[in-house]
Structures are given as structure tokens and as C-alpha cells.
Amino acid sequence: MNYESGVIESQGAHALSDGREDAGAGRRRTLIIALVLAALAAAAAYYFFRGGGEAQGPGGPAEAKGKREAQVPNVTVVAPGLQPIARTISATGTLAARRDLPVGVAGEGGLVTRVLVEPGQWVGAGQVLATVDRSVQTQTLAQLAAQVNVARAEAQLAQSELERAQALVSRGFVSKADVQRRTATRDQALARVRVAQAAVAEQRARTGRLDIRAPAAGLILTRQVEPGQIVGQGSGVLFRMAEGGRMEMQARLAESDLIGLPVGSRATVTPVGSERSFPGQVWQVSPVIDPQTRQGIARIALGYDRALRPGGFAAAQIVKGATQAPLLPDSAVLSDQQGSFVYVVDARNRAVRRDVKIGQVSDAGVAIAEGLDGTERVVLSAGGFLTPGQTVKPVVQARR
């Protein structure tokens, strides 16, 4: 570029020195200027393309690749494996005494004089719950007791006469026949004593049955009698007891849930309106199904607690068994009109939709009954923002 500038200056000086410019010299000058401009343009183009190539060489593709990688989203994935999942059954039902004992009048009845217990009170076996007036029975018992004394006196007299006769028979004052008659008289007197004693025992038993007693140890649930009330054989139930205070929940289950439910299965019972839960176990499974509701009853044994009130409503979770299945958090399972699905990342790091069937749902997560074998890389979250076939950058999370 400097050489060409010198030529231009030399030509300019020559023109001045000659003092002449003709048309041919002007054309040559224009041509030279055009050549200089073309050389400048070529040099600029060479510099541009050379510099651009160098930028594209070491830095350009790397920068472009970085931009493309920056556009690939990071997703957290996990291989869930197989975990033991408890199969639980949800049920509702009512609370009741495991053995509900109705207590009524066992004897003749009469006027109730005292009621000795209240609902919620513990009683022992044979304890008196209420008493019935026994004034007439007491007089009858006294009369029978007096008859026992009379019979004993007659028996003693007959025994004495027999002994005297036996002493005189050897002297010939009394015949053997007379001794035999006196022996028979003595035996009859002794028999009358035993009859009188049996009558007394019977009357005492009848009098004792006037007391309304607990048939077993347990908890008084209801009281339906008051002092002054006349009771008898037709009075019905006066008290209800829970034998031993033991309670149960009568859980109503569908026919399909009862199948294969073993006795001894663990359960958790929560009364309605209570935040407390009580452990129990199934002690009896109904052998029949209601033909109208297609339901049966599983009876869950519970220990005594004041919060368990017979007749109340409760909910139960019954553990029917355990199975091996993948367990995922709620955020990993999506759903649409076609059903439930998850996104798994394949070997080429592409998001692939996988339809699944949901099993047991609990606080621990969602069990996958069908669709996964536990070895897949499952997207834990943000699956709703992915599209099938989209390339992602998986970030593996350790399985807990």
C-alpha cells in the first residue's frame, strides 16, 4: 500500500513539473486509484475471513456447543428399584364391646331397693349390681329354718327311743319287731330333717337370685334400672357390660377385600373426631356376605381406652400383606386422559413417556403396580414441562 502511494505522489510531481495533464494521464490515475481500492478490499476480506476462521476454529464451535448445552434442561432422575410395600385396606365401621354381656333379672324379681353401680365402672365377677326387696322371702326362709329345727328335734327323740328299745330287747321287755319300728321312725325323722334343710337351701338360693349380679368381670356400659322400679322376668336388659373391658371395631369390607384377609392382620383404628389412633388386629373375619350390600365384617380387637366408646364410628387401615414394587414420590407420577404415566430417560438421554398402573398410595409415596421394573431412570419432577423425545441432562439422585 505504501508503494502505490509513492507512485501516485511521483506522478503528481511529474504532472506539476510538466504542467500538463492530458486525458490519458487522468485515465491512468483513475485506474491506479481503482486498483488501490480493490487491493484494500481484498486485504480487508482476507483479514476478515482469516480472523473469522480462527474465531470459529478454537472458540466458535465450543461456544455454540455450550449454548446448545445450556438449552438442554437438567432433570433429577432416580432408579427406584423394588421395595416392600404394605398392602392396606381402608374400612369404616362401628365400635363395640368385643363381648357384650346383657344383664337382667335371674330370679322372681320385685321392687328394686338399691342400684350399686354406674356406667363406666369396673366390676368383678359375681359383684352385686342392684338389690330387690326380699322382705317376704326373708320370712319364708325363717319359717323353713324353724321347720328344720323341728325335724331335728323329732329325729333326736326317735334316736333316743330307739336306743332305749335296743337296751331292753335283751331283757325281753321289748320285742325285736318293736325295735325295727323304732328304727324306721328314727330314719323317717332324719329324712324329714334333710328335706327341711333342702327347702331352706332352695329358699336361700331364690332369695340370693333377687340380687342382680355381674356374670363376669368387666366394664359397665349402660344402666337401665332405678330404685323403686318393679322388675321381673319380662323386664329385659337392666345393665350392659363389656367383658374384661375389651373393645373391637366391626369394620365393613367389600367382598373382594375379605378374600385372603388372614386372622391376626395388623390394623390401626381412628375414631371419628379423634386425632388418636389405636393399634389392633383382626380376630375374626365374617363367614357370610350380606347379599344386599355385598359386604362382610372384619372384627378388629382393641384394648380398653376411655376414648373407645361402643356405638361410635371409626375408620381403620388394615394391613393385608406386603408386595415388592417401585415406590415413587407424588411429583413423579402424572396423569392425563389416557391415564397415569411417568417420564423415563433412555440411553440417549431422551425423555420417554411410560404408562403405569398405580398401586398402593401412602405417605411414603406411590407404589407402581405395572409399567416399571425399578431399573429405569425415572424423572422425579418437572415432568409436566417435558415432551416425549426431548433431550435432557439427567442428574441422578441417590435412592433413599
Image (spheres, rainbow, N blue to C red):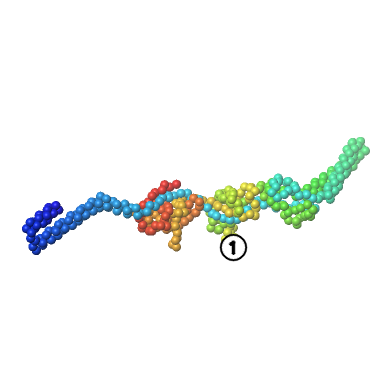
Q: Residue at x 65, y 52 (%)?
A: 309
Residue 139 x, y percent position in the rendering = 85, 48
Using the image, determine if residue 124 lies above or below residue 22.
above
Q: Residue at x 60, y 51 (%)?
A: 274
Residue 130 x, y percent position in the rendering = 76, 49
- Secondary structure under the numbered disc 1 in the rendered image: loop
Can residue 61 be seen in the rendering of this structure?
Answer: yes
Q: Residue at x 41, y 50 (%)?
A: 78
| Residue topped by disc 1 | 292
Q: How many marks?
A: 1
**Residue furthest out toward the right:** 173
* Frontmost residue, 186 versus 392: 392
Q: Residue at x 60, y 54 (%)?
A: 272
* Frontmost residue, 48 versus 260: 48
Residue 329 x, y percent position in the rendering = 46, 52
Can residue 108 be seen in the rendering of this structure?
Answer: no
